[in-house]
Amino acid sequence: MLLHITHATCYDYAPAVTIAQHMAYLKPLNTTTQQLLSHSLEITPEPAQQTAMQDVYGNTRLFFSLQSAHSQLQVVARSMVSTLAPPRFDSVMAWDAVREHFRYSAKHAYDAAAEFVFASPYVPRHADFAAYARPSFADGTPLLLAARDLMQRIHHDFTYESQSTQVNTPALDALAQRKGVCQDFAHIMIACLRACGLPARYVSGYLLTHPAPGQERLVGSDASHAWVSVYLPDGPDTPAGARWHDFDPTNNRDGWGTPGEDYVTLAIGRDYADVSPVRGVIHGGAHHTLRVAVTVEPVAATGWSSQSQGSGQNQSQSQSQSQSPAKSSDAML
């Protein structure tokens, strides 16, 4: 499937911001189930400096600074991504065997996935997460089946309700009130898995949504999305990094490397704090408003082929300027 994503972020400031440093995670990853075909980023006003680099998890992290007064900041990312349906693979390794695999031992070989076993800023340790997870994790149950059962229980037990939580709402609060948005459900599922000693990571991205019958697709009406990735040591080991199985508790879908071909992975981390799409530090702008518009739309293969030369020209133009769903969360940014 070919998907075109436009992610527009706009901050309005009063009074004007005099100087600002920002960081953005807006470039989709190349993975076993998706390929980034094109990407452009327009920043207005023009940054005085900008530098892109890979972070420790392989995400593209862009730093940019604004050193003149401005009352508005616009960041528009456009990406074309080719996606695949997840391959089928049945893992049989028991969840408690996976837990033992990550239990510390002085002579145990290091596994990089161990970093995702520990607490993180948005995913603390708490007995309530362990208690909620317990019914899904009977002794000897394959981790794939236990994690799928946990996902299904969250999907059934929790109510998706926009504006019911904020971006910084603690996962424990969302667990208690049994409602939230995709970010909350992802954090809750990760917390439950880590409470069992299992590695789980946060995935930010997009999901292709479909308008109601008879309605046109609305530009800017989509939103960022979030789901969970669980490490299965007996999963496919080629290419590297393919041992992660993705679970979307918001929509009750899962698959190897992606919940489906209508998903686009933007970045991965321990939790939302690692992969916030746009954040920064500003001087001035005591009051500000944020507007975010996301559009995810399918592109016919013939349309992409005929547009590819033109899209390359548009990308170089935008770069030059910068140098001279299904359910998803509207609270992600």
Image (spheres, helix red, strand yellow):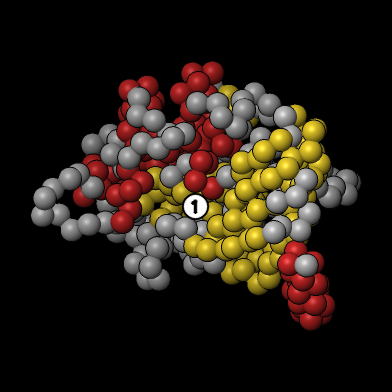
Quarter-of-image position of residue 64: bottom right
Quarter-of-image position of residue 103: top left
Quarter-of-image position of residue 82: bottom right
**Kind of residue indicated by mark 1:** Ile
Quadrant occupied by the C terminus: top right
**Residue 147 image point, x, y percent:** 39, 42
**Residue 70 image point, x, y percent:** 79, 45
Which is more toward the observer, 316 or 108? Answer: 316
Instruction: Judge left or right: residue 3 versus residue 114.
Output: right
Q: Residue furthest top?
A: 177
Mark 1 Cα shell of 10 Å, populated few (<14), some (14-19), many (≥20): many
Which residue is at 40% across, 48% downward?
A: 230
The answer to whether residue 62 of the structure is visible from this angle is yes
The residue tagged 1 is 268
Which is more toward the observer, 311 or 63? Answer: 63
The answer to whether residue 100 of the structure is visible from this angle is no
Which residue is at 57% across, 63% downward?
A: 52
Quadrant occupied by the N terminus: bottom right
Which residue is at 36% across, 46% downward?
A: 116
Mark 1, secondary structure of its residue: strand
Instruction: Judge left or right: residue 272 versus residue 145.
Output: right
